[in-house]
Amino acid sequence: MFDFFRKHTKIVMAFLFLLIIPSFVFFGVERYTQGDGKGEKVARVDGHDITRPEWDQQHRNEVDRIRQQSPSIDAALLDSDAARYATLDRMVRDRVLQTAADKTHMTVSEDKLARIFAQDQGLAAFRGADGKFDRELFMRTTQQTPEQYEASVRAQLATQQVLQGVSGSAFATKAQTEATINAFYDRREVQVARFNAADFAAKVTVSDADLEAYYKDHPALFQAPEQAAVEYLVLDLDAVKKNIAVSEADAKAYFEQNKARFGTKEERRASHILITAPASAPAAEREKAKAKAEQLLAEVKKSPASFADIARKNSQDPGSAEKGGDLDFVTRGAMVKPFEDAMFALKKGEISAVVETEFGYHIIRLTDIKPEQVPPFEQVRARIEDEVRAQQATQEFAKAAETFTDLVYQQPDSLQPAADKLKLKLQTASNVARTPAAGATGALASRNFLGALFAADSLERKHNTEAIEVGPSQLASGRVAKYAAARTLPFAEVKDKVRSQLVAERAAALAKTEGEARLRAWQADSAGATLAAPVTVSRLETQSLPAPVIEGALRADTSKLPAWAGVDLGAQGYAVVRVNKAVPRAPSTPETAQQEAGQFAQVISAAENAAYYELLKQRYKAEILVPRPAEPTR
């Protein structure tokens, strides 16, 4: 709502993200405390390691959950270096907070836990009509036992307490809030002169000697990346399905067990008359409604043909009354249970007794029946066989995966034995790099798989990689057939690129020199200054000016106006800014001021939390052992 807080996205969103994605709840606290001790160590907290397999598994869990919630999200975004590093960062944070909770003996009372579970709407889905908790359904759905879930909630609540003492005590005075908010909304009337690097390119002259010297001094700018030609196999459910033959007996048995799914369910059409009486209504009111319904029932029993007319005049269901009570065709499950039970007990043309539901009292007349229709076996045979294969493939995949894993390891010089045994297609690719190419799919989009291909053993000995999980029920193994290391391209091949790079750098330097000279001259005598028309700018209203120009204008000393500032725009050139006057912010309404104060207090709280978390990281010697990915260039 307020742009001030949009500008603090990194702080606020980082804090909210940690609240929104409580890893303990989704994946179980034991995942954080029980590693297998194998694999590369990627982080360490309080002397305990986080390994790459743990990191990979956690990231897959998060990606799967996000994809379930947002199926249209770009998969490349979820598997980027930044997204993977963010997962590791959250794992470290969870471990730090868990360690702090354990060492400070944070506990959660049984009463508090009971209240939380009672209010958890998600848990209500696992209770039957009798209120009994369905343990098996819970375990199938969540992949954890109720005891594990309880332990994970306890752990989450305990870790929340670690920060609550800090965030709960954070506050901002009115003076602090106003000073910060007003400074953010501060505005300046400015005039700007731009010295664009591109305008100075024609003034740059470079010799072949200059180009060769620049090429030698900057070899990293002119490299061809390492590349490999690879062959690989992918084992997935589709591959396993192709090897499964469905017998006639299995197909017919499946058909008999699932007939209802292949045809159409029985449908019934009814009309009704409703006299409303909510379940919460007084008993006297419900008795009066029931008596009215009994009276109308007697009338329609005497003259069934008048049912529609009586419904139009008396039914209190606005959706059907004007249609003579008609409810159209429905299947089981569409109506509340008492109504449905009565409707499906009637024969065509029959009228029910008065039926009580939570909405009131109904009189039901069954007007038509569409019986269940089941197609003949041969008509749905192909669909049946496909479904049976899919079911059996899920069971057979584990066996195939074990065979796949053994074969690519036992015969490391070739993938052909595994391909022959499991009837897999041997795939090839050229110009493969360590990171996924734009638009890559399947195994070649997996960073884990590419990392294994470019591991030292794979490159030096041309051996198969181990079986790598590249997706849900997807394993891949590959080997490098040909490898070309990264190399600096020959000068003759990149001469034009060298020229462009050097000219751009020198043009930017000329622009800066010119801009600085003009700044000094105009500060001494502004009469001859050639500046753009005055505009009023702020951090929210940039008037299409670069962010460094805005910051330069806002940081300029306005105690003596006009104020001048020079802004180095790097490769874009240089800008001279003249600040004519400070423009105060328009007074905000009391409601806006109150909301801003509340949101500013949240930012302060988030900052206090962040500072305390940094202290805990130092206390428990938390460190990430892999490099942070570079920020994407714009």
Image (cartoon, rainbow, N blue to C red):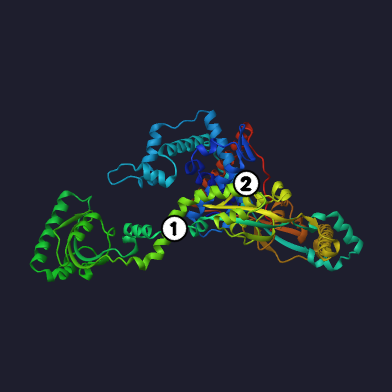
Q: According to the image, label 1 marks what residue?
A: 389
Inspect this view and state whether residue 173 appears.
Answer: no
| Residue drawn where x is 50% and y is 48% of the image | 398
Give the percent coordinates (x, y) of residue 370.
25, 68
Disc marking residue 410: 2
Q: Quadrant of the C terminus?
A: bottom right
Q: Is residue 48 above or below residue 406?
A: above
- Nearest the eye: 239 or 521: 239
Which of the 4 image quarters holds residue 307?
Answer: bottom left
| Residue drawn where x is 16% and y is 71% of the image | 309
Q: Is residue 528 above or below residue 590?
A: below
Give the percent coordinates (x, y) of residue 189.
68, 60
Q: Amino acid at mark 1?
A: Arg
2 and 1 marks in contact (CB < 8 Å): no
Of the two numbered discs 2 and 1 on the same chain, state the one appearing first in sequence: 1
Which of the 4 image quarters holds residue 290?
Answer: bottom left
Give the percent coordinates (x, y) of residue 52.
61, 43
Mark 2 residue crowding within 10 angstroms, few (<14) / some (14–19) / many (20+): few
- Nearest the eye: 544 or 336: 336
Looking at the rendered structure, the secondary structure element under dot 2 is helix
Mark 1 residue crowding within 10 angstroms, few (<14) / some (14–19) / many (20+): many
Mark 2 vs mark 1, CA separation in Å? 29 Å
